[in-house]
Every structure is written in C-alpha cells, then in structure tokens.
Amino acid sequence: MREPADNKPPESLPYAGIRVVEFTHMVMGPTCGLVLGDLGAEVIKVEPPGGDNTRRLLGSGAGFFPLFNRNKKSIVLDLQTPAGREAALRLVGTADVVSENFRPGTMKKLGLDHATISRLNPRVISVSHKGFLPGPYDHRTALDEVVQMMGGLAYMTGRPGDPLRAGSSVNDIMGGMFGAIGAMAALAQREKTGRGQEVQSALFENNVFLVAQHMMQFAVTGQPAAPMPGRISAWGVYDVFTVKDGEQIFLAAVSDSQWKVFCDAFGFADLLADARLQSNNDRVQVRDWLIPLLRERLARHSAAELAAVFERNGLPFAPITQPEQLFDDPHLNATGGLAPLQLQDGRETKVPLLPLTLDGHRPAVRLQPPALNEHGPALLRELGYSQEQIAQLAAPG
C-alpha cells in the first residue's frame, strides 16, 4: 500500500508570501480563500462583530465553517464604523488579493471597491464572487438552488418532471474555485505588468459551464439531453444493482472487451454467444430486457463478492457510500487525503484536503479554523495600532 505523501514545508508552497484579505461568508467566497490558503497564501478573514454566521449554522450548514476556513487568520472589524473601515483600508493596503462575496454595490458603499483600493494599492487584485456576472440578472439574489434551477442542472439531476438540487454546494464551491483561478491568473499577469486587476466569478455562469456538455450535445445532435435518471445510457451495462441482503452496488462494462471479461468472470457463456449482444450499441438497444436479466442473475451475490470479482478483473464498480463513511475510507487514510482538524468546540476530527498533489505532497492544514478575532490584535499591531487603539476598536460601539 502506498505510504501517505509527506506535506510540503510551508515556505515551499507556491503562494507563500502572498497575502489575501477576504470579506467573505457562507461557501463561495470562503472556498476561494481556502484554495489560496491551502496553497500557501496568508489568508486573513475579516469578520463582523459576532463573527461569520456560518460559525453558528445548524443542519446542512453545520460543517461550513470548519471546512472552508482552515489555513486562515481571523480579525473582527466593524465595517459600519469609520474606525473599522479605516482599519480595513490599512489592512487592504498590505494585501496582494482582496476577496469578497457581498451583494453588488456593498464594497463601493464601504469604500473598499476595486477602484478605491487600487488607488491605495495599485498592485492589489480584487476578486468578487457574485450570483451573476454583470448583466440583466445581476440585481437578482442568487443561491446555489436558484442557479441550479434556472441553469439546467436541477433538470438534469432529477427524474423527468422532478427537478432536483445536486447533493452538494457545487456552484458555491466551484464558483469559489474559479475565483481562485482568476486570482492566480491575475497574480501571474501582475508579474508582467506590475499592476493588479479585478476578477469576477459568478454562480450562474459556473452552473452554465457545468451543463455545457448537455448544451453541446444538443448542438451536435439536435436532440435535447434527457435528465440523467431518464436518459438513454451510452453503455450497455452501467447501473446500480440491488443484490443480496438488499445491498446496492454500481457495476459497469462499457466496452466490448469488458463485456467479454464480465461474462467470463460470471460464467455467462449464453450471453456472450447471444447475437443480440455482440456490441455495446447492440446491448444499449436491448437494455430493457438485458438489465432485468442481469439484476436477477447478480442478486444472489453479496455486494462484497461482486466487488471482489470486478476488482480482480479490472472492471468498473463502486459501493454506494454515504459521506460519513468516507472518514474510514482505506484509500483516503492510506494516502494522507484526510488531515486532523479541530472543531470549534475542541473536538478532533479529520477533513479532506485539496484533491491534488504538488511534487508528490498534499497541501496541508497549517492553521486550524480560527477562533473569532484570534489574530486580530497581532494584525492590528502590525498595522501600527497601539494597544489603546486596539482596545478601542474592540470596544462595543
């Protein structure tokens, strides 16, 4: 079994020495900072009095703060006060990247928009995460669900007539990733020009990118893409099977050679010889009777038995896994894909790292999710504030 890759020293990470100041909340904006922070940047999270609301979310939002705010420092500034805005301007003056996901116009009202801060710091890169790029929709309030519904993803995910939100915050997360990619591109261009620029990323446009394959399917074939649960599969064997003891497993044989291996492995010589099943396209045409027949034959096996046969023969398969079961996944644990993390209440857990390696190393958790204002006093001292001034900034009102 492969040993976990050692983590790279912080100073060797690609964005070591880059300072990111983020005015972000929820998922989209914090994801941008997460990516840059994992890749070595110093990320300073500016929080309002009381802190980012995701510190207190329940239910499906309970994991937002610990997941998206590792490798960051926290400072509390009241941007509704002149003193808070002045401190924010001083902080922005030291930044390479400023990231935000407020409603359109909010940063301008606060005097923190790109036009203003670039006069203070011409090298600064501003990254704005919005619901829509500038245009007819940019006044609308967007959520991941909103853009999934209007952008075709919910249609493609649900059964016909039953649009369904994808089971993760896909647009928020990917929108933040594209914000980070834009920041990286702007940092590379700054090396040539010496100047920063404004980067924009948006939920709706991200969602359209996700369904572009289905748009282009229509462009090529003239046929609208059917929702994934109701589509005509491109593969003869490509489905979830309910097997012994009610367990479920995904099994596939997507080529003619895989079909032969599959039939040989299970002794299905009759199917291999059937003239109606000689090519993948032949098998697609008769899925209406082939798949029920395979379900009947495979139902006597356990999921573990089927998995063993498929793995031994190099055939595609997958257990049907719930997210919480991934904490114990042997591959993730053996390869260092899960890192120790401390929750806000002090409990220890593990968290997935970025899905990449750099020179064989996984970018690590260097800083635990910060306590509220954990780094505020030190950052303010660095900006030239006296102890008395820091106390005044922290005082209510």
Image: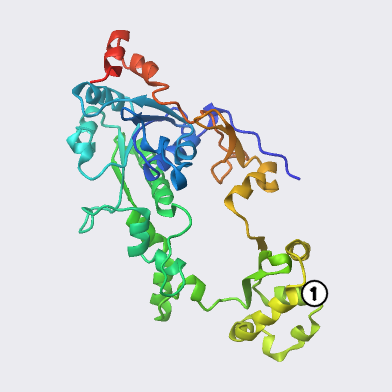
Residue 96 percent coordinates (x, y): 35, 31
Q: Position of residue 64 (x, y in %)?
A: 45, 41
Give the percent coordinates (x, y) of residue 288. 60, 84
In front: 95, or 397? Answer: 397
Image spot of residue 24 (x, y percent): 34, 38
* Observer-nearest of 345 and 14: 345
- 155 to 59, vertically: above or below: below
Viewer-closest of 103 and 96: 103
> Eyeballing the image, is 141 above or below 106?
below
Q: Would you name the residue on which mark 1 appears? A: 266
Q: Nearer the viewer, residue 242 or 177?
A: 242
- Residue drawn at x 79%, y 74% is 266
Residue at the spot x=37%, y=66% of the render? 152
Q: Is residue 264 visible?
A: yes
Query: Which residue: 56% across, 41% down?
Result: 353
Q: Quadrant of residue 41?
A: top left
Which quarter shows the C terminus?
top left
- Name the side, left or right, on which 56 lies relative to 355: left
Q: What amino acid is found at the position of numbered circle 1 in the picture?
A: Phe
Within 10 Å of disc 1 (Cα), the crowding (few <14, some 14-19, many 20+) is few
Q: How is the image coloured?
A: rainbow
Is label 1 in a helix, a strand or a loop? helix
User: Does residue 315 appear in the picture of this structure?
Assistant: no
> In which quadrant of the rendered image does the N terminus lie?
top right
Residue 278, quarter of picture: bottom right
Q: How many marks?
A: 1
